[in-house]
Amino acid sequence: MVTTTARDTDLASALVQTMHRLQDVHAETSRPLGLTPQQAHLLCVLIAGPLGMTELSRILSIERSSLTSMVDRLERRTLVARIPSATDRRACQIELTPEGLSLAHDAHNAVVDRINTLTADLPASTRRTLATALQSII
C-alpha cells in the first residue's frame, strides 16, 4: 500500500499549478503571433527538425485527424511543408519553412521571456535549484 505524505501532495499540487500557469503563458504569448497554443507548440516541436505525422501526433497528444487539419492550416499559411518520405510513399514528414522557423523561434522566445519575467525576483541559487529539480523530473 502506498501512502501519500503531505509533502508529496504539496509537490504534486505545485507542479499541477505550474503546468496550468505555463499553459496560460503559452496561450498569452501565442495569440499575438496569430497562432493557437497548439499551433505554436507544433512549430516549436519542429524546430529540432522534420517529423512524421505519427510522431507529431504522439508528441502533441492529439488525434491524427486533428493534426492533419492543423498541418493543413499551417501549410496554407506557408509555415510548414509536407515532405514525401524517401522510404514510404504513403507517408510524409512535416518541416518548417523559413517563415515557419522564424515564427517558431518568436513563439519560443516569447514564452522564455515571459517565464524570465515571472521568475526574475527569485534568487540565483533558487533558480539553479529549481532548474536542476525540473531537469531531473523531465
Image (spheres, helix red, strand yellow):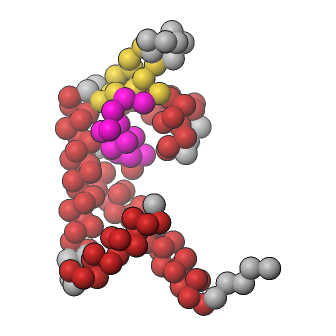
Which quadrant, please, contains the C terminus? bottom left
Question: On the image, which quarter does residue 122 sit in?
Answer: bottom left
Asked if residue 129 is positioned above or below residue 114 in the image, the reply reads below
Residue interval drawn in magenta: 38-51
Residue 94, position as x, y percentages in the image: 40, 26
Q: Residue at x 35, y 71 (%)?
A: 132
The vertical placement of 41 against 98, above or below, is: below
Nearer to us in this view, 78 or 97:
97
Q: Image height check: is 2 above or below 97?
A: below
Query: In this figure, what is the number of numbered marks?
Result: 0
List x then y, in percent, for residue 130.
35, 75
Q: Position of residue 99 (x, y in %)?
A: 21, 31
Magenta highlight: main SS: helix
Residue 43 visible (yes or no)? no
Residue at x 30% of width, y 30% of height: 96
Residue 13, percent from left and from top = 53, 79
| Residue that appears at 27% across and 77% down | 127
Q: Is residue 19 left or right of residue 81?
A: right
Is 50 within the magenta? yes
Which quadrant would the N terminus be assigned to in this image?
bottom right
Residue 40 in which image quadrant: top left
Residue nearer the viewer, 122 or 2: 2
Residue 41 lies within the magenta run: yes
Query: Would you say 117 lies left or right of 48 here?
Result: left
Q: Is residue 78 visible?
A: yes
